Structure formats: structure tokens, C-alpha cells
Amino acid sequence: DAGITQSPRHKVTETGTPVTLRCHQTENHRYMYWYRQDPGHGLRLIHYSYGVKDTDKGEVSDGYSVSRSKTEDFLLTLESATSSQTSVYFCAIQGTGVGNNEQFFGPGTRLTVL
Amino acid sequence: KQEVTQIPAALSVPEGENLVLNCSFTDSAIYNLQWFRQDPGKGLTSLLLIQSSQREQTSGRLNASLDKSSGRSTLYIAASQPGDSATYLCAVGGSQGNLIFGKGTKLSVKP
């Protein structure tokens, strides 16, 4: 357990509404990631952060934005949710220390967009 | 573009059997390779991490090998148990730590 929590754990929303998912970590890790998992596609990277206010795009970033104003929180926002964004969203952190680049995942958020 | 393939997609074995799960990747310029386990409806649990300079890692009944030149990794599970039933995911790491995942092998170990 790397001290990662995600909220909410489940959410149902309607097309066109904004949605924000939160990832919280307690161990001061520098690198944080957002992935989505879909049947037939596996896990794909949406955005990642390498420090406070430092973020970059991943493979499937269209329709998503992120923010990191504090080390412990990494927020993922769907500006205007679409049905194609129905998915399970996982947050991950990367271990700290020399040679310790193992990634640990949060419990996930199941998002349904109607 | 890096692509990760896991074969087979599903595997069913009797309890006690030794088994090998395969992972291949198209670009050998990786930083590391990580194996995960995922139970239905759950998150990912890290099993083993192999750095690009390493050839293998072991943890209990699990042994993972890495051959960068051929773009392959294997996860060996000894003396399989019903509790090993899960989906096993292979992921290769890039320069910013971003992971590229295979689609997994769903393992069923029957008592």
C-alpha cells in the first residue's frame, strides 16, 4: 500500500457535465499518473505530473485536463463528459529513491457517463 | 510507437502446475519492465520490477526475466495455486516513468 486514495470511487454523470476525479498520496512522491482502463484496450496513459504545476500529456489526453497545485493531490478533469469517457480511471505514483521507479496504483474510480 | 503484446490472452491450468506467461515489446529502448496482478474489479498490484540493466527478478514463487535485445519478458509461476487466479499485466517503462501496458493474460488455476 503506497498510501494512494482516489475519490470518488464510483460516479454516474450525464453527457456534457464537468467531472473532477481526485488522487491523493501521503508519501511525497514526485511523479503521479492518470490511466484509464477499457476492455480491449488495456490501460492507457492520460496525463502525468513530475512535480507541482508540472504536467504533460499521455497517449489519450484529448478531452481531459489535469492540475497539481500540491504535491499530494493530482486532479483529473473531464471538461464536458462524453459516453466514450466511461471507463475505470486509475491513479499511480512512482517510487522515490535511486533506482526505485516502481509504480503503485490506487484502487480506481469507475465512471459512467450516460 | 512502443507496443506490448501478451500471449496467451487466457490460460487455464490445474493446481500445482508450473507455468510461464509471455510478454513481448517492439522497442528495446525501455527503462524497466513491471509485472502486475489484477483481480476482478480491483486495482493493480505490483509483482516484480526489472530494471533495463537486469536480467531477472524473483519474489517467492514468481520469477521474471528480461531479454531486451529480443524484446521479451517471461513471468514464471511455480507450483500454481487457485489463489493465483487473476489477470497478469506486463508494462514497459519509458523515460518519464510512463508505462505502456499489454492487454494481459487471464489465468485460471483449477483445484
Image (tube, rainbow, N blue to C red):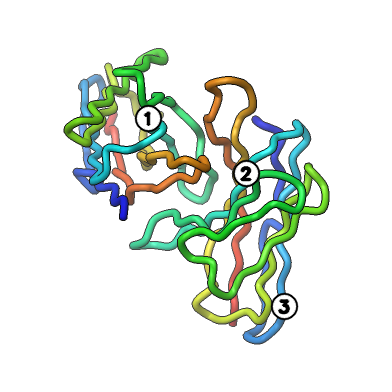
Q: Is residue A33 left or right of residue B17?
A: right
Distance of label 1 from label 3 (alpha carbons):
39 Å
Is residue A72 positioned above or below B62 on the image? below
Tell me the residue at 43%/36% (across/down). Answer: B37
- Disc 1 crowd, CA 10 A, few/some/many (<14, 14-19, 20+): some
Which of the labelled discs sits on residue A18, or is there none?
Answer: 3
Identify the mark at residue A38; answer none if there is no mark.
Answer: none
Q: Nearer the viewer, residue A37 or B85?
A: A37
The amino acid pointed to by label 1 is: Asp
Q: Is residue A85 left or right of residue B31?
A: right
Determine if marks 2 and 3 fall on one subunit: yes
Secondary element at tag 1 = helix
Circle 1 is placed at which residue position?
B84
Q: Is any atom of residue B9 visible in this view?
A: yes
Position of the C terminus of chain A, as image quadrant, is bottom right
- The kind of residue tagged 3 is Pro
Label 2 and label 3: CA atoms lie apart by: 22 Å
Looking at the picture, which amino acid does disc 2 mark? Gly
User: Is the C-beta separation of discs 1 and 3 under 8 Å?
Assistant: no
Name the residue carrying label 2.
A106
Chain of the residue that carries numbered disc 3 in the rendered image: A
Q: Pointers 1 and 2 in contact (CB under 8 A)?
A: no
Marks 1 and 2, how far apart at CA: 21 Å
Do pointers 1 and 2 mark residues of a single chain? Answer: no
The chain holding disc 2 is: A
**Numbered disc 2: secondary structure:** loop
Image coords of residue A18 (percent x, y): 72, 78
Quadrant where the N terminus of chain A sits is top right
In the rendered view, tell whether residue A3 sits above or below residue A12: above
Is residue A36 placed above or below A6 in the rendered structure?
Answer: below
Q: Residue at x 48, y 65 (%)?
A: A60
